[in-house]
Amino acid sequence: MKIQLIGTGTIPDLTNSASVLINNHILFDIPNGNLKAMIRQNIDILKIDTLIISHTHADHCFDAPFLLWYKENYKKEGESLSTKIITDKITQNTVENLIDLSHFNSARKAKKQFIDAEKVNNIERICDDLQILNEPIEHEHQTIKYANGYIIKDKNISIGLTGDSIFCQGVKNIASKVNYLISDMTLEIGDKSHMGINNILELLKEYPKLKIIPIHMHDKTREKAKKLDIDNLMILQDGDILEL
Ligand SMILES: [Zn+2]
């Protein structure tokens, strides 16, 4: 499985906002600025056929119209490209509104198919090469009702993606089933919205074979985590590629 970290950071920091490309065609989260970040990383945008959006916060879905715009404008003549968008109903509504507000005809025209996150586990094949499973997690209770983590696996490897999450049972469920966990680690100490280094250390203690790749990190959190120098905590940079 090929993993490319498009963004490892969070809103006010120097790095790109969190987003991960899997096997060159499945994009997990599409924050503001994501399309340009992918262009800078020489990614073939036309190959992206599946978009998984963890939740409706702007730094996870606001570039969706630009991806659709790009595919519609740069596809070969006569080619029909469709994008599967796996997300919850609230985020679907946000994305549909964004497309409308963009006033780009090509974004409006681009072929897309929304797949309800709650139904993903009952669909045998969304992609030919990988299985995608949903695991609900908890994020900001007051503003966001729905947030979803995911497990993506092939014959040999399984990776978990928490999206933005507090340290909750959903995260532990994902961690117990995967080889690699690409996890929210925004903070030094986790709070009521995001996980921190302290939560990640707890997970590593509970699942000693697990390798954790943190994303959605504040710059300060990243620096602190690097200094800890823990084998199974892989502090990666924007653009890094892993062949697992
Ligand atoms: Zn969020």
Image (cartoon, rainbow, N blue to C red):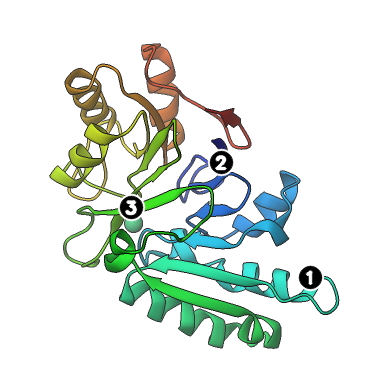
Residue that label 1 marks = 75
Q: Amino acid at mark 3?
A: Leu
Which quarter of the figure has residue 210?
top left
Residue that label 2 marks = 15
Disc nearest the viewer among 1 and 3: 3
Callout 3 secondary element = strand
Give the mark nearest the N terminus, 1 or 3.
1
Question: Is disc 2 surrounded by few (<14), some (14 to 19) or many (20+) residues within 10 Å?
Answer: some
- x%, y% of residue 205? 19, 18
- Does the beta carbon at disc 1 come under 8 Å from ligand 1? no
- x%, y% of residue 50? 54, 61
Q: Residue at x 64, y 80 (%)?
A: 110
Residue that label 3 marks = 133
Along the viewing direction, whichever of 32 and 26 lies nearer the viewer: 26
Callout 2 secondary element = loop
Q: Are marks 3 and 2 in contact (CB under 8 Å)?
A: no
Callout 1 secondary element = loop
Q: Residue at x 32, y 45 (%)?
A: 162
- Give the Cα distance between marks 1 and 2: 29 Å
Along the viewing direction, whichever of 35 and 4 lies nearer the viewer: 4
- x%, y% of residue 195? 26, 39
State whether residue 103 is above or below residue 57: below
The reply, left or right, for residue 64 in relation to residue 87 is right
Q: Residue at x 53, y 48 (%)?
A: 129
Quadrant for ligand 1 reads bottom left
Disc nearest the viewer among 3 and 2: 3
